[in-house]
Image: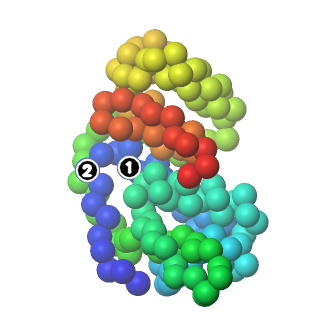
Amino acid sequence: MTGHIKILNDPVELVPLLITFNNADYKKIYEFLNKAWLTEEDLVAYAAPPSTVTECLSILKKGNLIEEQWRMPKPGEKPTKEYRATYSKFRASFQCSMGDIGDLLHIAVSNDEGLRTIVDSVEQEIVAGTTSIGDISRKYGVSPIFIKGLAKRIPPGLDVKGQGMVLLDRLQ
């Protein structure tokens, strides 16, 4: 176990945590990563199907909840990435409106397909050149925190960089 404390200063950072611990497979994966360095293949063998492991690792990366390093291969083999949980404790230090926390909780635990529709629209905006979170939130009539929360929810397509949105490489 690492012993580091995850300090949340932004309520958006709750989304990856809530997603991780609201899904039994993701929670199991996090618990394994809290004990040892493991590769994706290790996690598939211990915990869940390959697609679930890949999605979980994407969420954990977005939340900066895991660290990665290259595992030294045996002679003649390719190196592989291995992962470990970065934090074993949690502390929150933020304030936000009840509307914003409500939006973030809805985003994190909802199965609403309407969220996917909004994400698809936001991705089209980014491809067209609109990357400002403020501009995107005004266009869709939602708060900037709502847009940031969506970016943290949807693996692996979107992420937040400063005051803008970026499309992530889908092969990460």
Q: Can the viewer see residue 31 in this picture?
A: no
Q: Residues within 10 Å of mark 1 (few under 14, many from 20)?
A: many
Q: Position of residue 98 (x, y in %)?
A: 36, 36
Q: Is residue 45 above or below residue 74?
A: above
- Spatial CA distance of label 2 from label 1 is 8 Å
Q: At label 1, which amino acid type do we have? A: Glu
Q: Which mark is residue 9?
A: 2
Q: Is residue 35 above or below residue 68?
A: below
Q: Position of residue 57 (x, y in %)?
A: 56, 60
Q: At label 2, which amino acid type do we have? A: Asn
Q: Residues within 10 Å of mark 2 (few under 14, many from 20)?
A: few
Is residue 138 left or right of 70 when viewed as pictured?
Answer: left
Q: Residue at x 60, y 59 (%)?
A: 56
* Quarter occupied by residue 133: top left
Mark 1 sits on what residue?
A: 13
Q: Residue at x 30, y 55 (%)?
A: 8
CB under 8 Å between discs 2 and 1? yes
Q: Can the viewer see residue 34 in this picture?
A: yes
Tell me the SS state at disc 2: loop
Count every numbered label the image shows and give the total: 2
Q: Position of residue 88 (x, y in %)?
A: 38, 75
Q: Residue at x 46, y 40 (%)?
A: 159
